[in-house]
Image: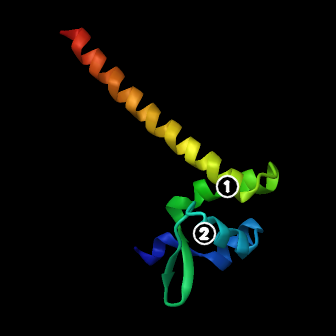
Amino acid sequence: MDRENLIPIQDFCSIYKVPETFIASLYEYELIEITTTENTQSVSVTQIKNIEKLIRFHFEMDINLEGIHAISNLLDKVETLQEEIKKLHNKIDFYERE
């Protein structure tokens, strides 16, 4: 991965004012990916929106990591189902035009 698209975890945590242990826990629960380059652990900028959401769940809504894991899995399934519904609507529209 291009180093320009990576943010060291230490920098991320100081910007967002979250402990590094929280980011490590998100990684342990497989909610985020961490990339290690030259002994520096980093997160991809493409994950920032998701990590921000997880931070809000935990620190603003007081949801524990197990709950965040369950919520994330459910949200992923909802997104997958929404994409499937969209594809099916497109197929229906195609056949209705004929």
Q: Quadrant of the C terminus?
A: top left
| Amino acid type, callout 1 | Leu
Foreground residue among 9 and 31: 31
Left or right? Give the position of 13 relative to 47.
right
Amino acid type at circle 2 is Glu
Numbered tag placed on residue 54 in the rendering: 1
At 44% from the left edge and 39% from the top edge, which residue is drawn?
80
To which quarter of the image does residue 75 belong? Answer: top right
Residue 39 vertical placement versus 10 (above, below): below
What residue would you read off at disc 2? 28
In percent of width and height, residue 67 lies at: 70, 51
Q: Residue shown at 66%/69% (left/top)?
A: 25
- Which of discs 2 and 1 lies nearer the camera? The answer is 2
Tally of numbered discs: 2
Give coordinates of residue 39: x percent, y percent.
Answer: 54, 90
- Which of disc 1 and disc 2 is earlier in sequence? 2
